[in-house]
Image: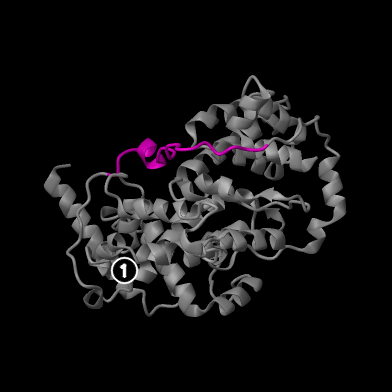
Amino acid sequence: MSHSDSQDAIRAFETKAASLIAATRSLDISRILTLRRLTLADAQSRRWASEKQLTVLFSVILTKAAERYGLDALKAARTRGFAPLVAGEGDGRDEDLRVLGEIATQLLGPPERDAAEESLAGFQALLSRGFAPIPPRTARVQAAGREPPPLFAAQLGPMGDRRAARALPPEESGVDFAALFDETLCSYVQKTLSVFRITSPTHGIRLPFLVAPEFGPVYREVMRRFILPQMRATRHIQALGQSCNWAEVGGARLIELIQGSEVNNPILHNWEARWAAFRPAKPTTPRGRKSADDDNPWPLLREEATRCNFLPPGEDDLTLLRDVLRFEAEAIARCWRDLGQLYAQEFGADGRGEPGREGVLRDGLLRWFPKLPDHVGEHLAIKAVFEFERVDAAWLNRLFGGLGRTDSERRRVAPYLADFLTELM
């Protein structure tokens, strides 16, 4: 494709996306879901947008429609299986329920679990699988000055050159850039966290925060209170708000920046600067000034961790908390699907009544570890304990043993996995 053809394709996408956003502002959720199915199935739509672009575009449209509908009303509808919002039968209805369920989880958090699932009997059943002895717990030391993990977008291929849209002042574009900025980044991060989220019963075990079902809404609250408003107040983001006609380009342009180059990237630069502000301050302050203790997320994170029973993140976890924005949800989901296939090969029936090949799941995850950003592989291993029925503590210990020749080396590679094994004891 020539450069002029590429420009025409981008121009066509921007025009169509702007028209679609404008046309759906007055539609209710049920009609937007119907329009989504028809658009994805229409071969003509694929001439101006890929399936991924259409999925992201409709995710933003449905999120805004759900907010207009009201969070309380959305929560009540979820308890009734979204009966007031989803009509029809067959595969289309199942797909609508799945999409609307993801939107509701992003806005409201996961549905409340039955207390019976957290009973002592379930906890004892998990412990009865048996655990190998675990070495004494050692303090985890955060390495200083580490480079951020590589972007998954680089592994999936270049994005291609894109054209910036014609700039218009916010009052003329008709788009609330602050709301678009906040919602796009929150939705993008929530999609990543949903890949890590454990959906099976946890039997009261305190989970690492990244895989805890309740952590997604907590992280969203941290972003809305402590991260995004301060980012929008910087001159870089204010200039970004003036650089495009956001009614035309929408949130897809922001996602393109997140996944793009780190050179002169206003979103990644200010995102990292904001998280860096939460590092522990020096013990002394000039002339007795008080430090801004209320301008950090740690009290909120500790409070919610206690209330929801997951291990609270602290200053040592700043790198992982910061890098969530850099993770590519689709690449991590692809890894998880691969692990599911390997689990079926080792523990599932192969159609001939023969046992699966022993160790294929463990070996496959060990091959994934160096391909993933730091700490992603170990959290997927923790998730596997709850999502895969035949994966138990003995399997987890064998996996941990394959991460290094010495205990200190293994703990350096997978500190969260080491702490989780200690927590189980």
Q: Position of residue 423 (x, y in %)?
A: 75, 43
Looking at the image, which residue is at 48% across and 66% down? Answer: 224
Q: Is residue 53 left or right of residue 363?
A: left
Q: Position of residue 410 (x, y in %)?
A: 63, 27
In-front residue for pair 209/390: 209
Q: Quadrant of residue 76?
A: bottom right
Task: Name the residue beneath numbered marker 1.
Answer: 20
Asked if residue 162 is among those painted magenta in the image, a careful observer would answer: no
Q: Residue furthest top?
A: 405
Looking at the image, which residue is at 43% across and 46% down? Answer: 326
Q: Main secondary structure of the magenta part?
A: loop
Q: Is residue 382 above or below residue 27?
A: above
User: Would residue 211 be seen by someone viewing this image from the given angle?
Assistant: yes
User: Would residue 30 be seen by someone viewing this image from the given angle?
Assistant: no
Q: Which residues are magenta?
A: 139-159
Q: Position of residue 62 (x, y in %)?
A: 44, 68
The scheme the figure's colours follow is one colour
At label 1, the amino acid type is Leu
Looking at the image, which residue is at 19% across and 54% down? Answer: 163
Q: Is residue 24 left or right of residue 408?
A: left
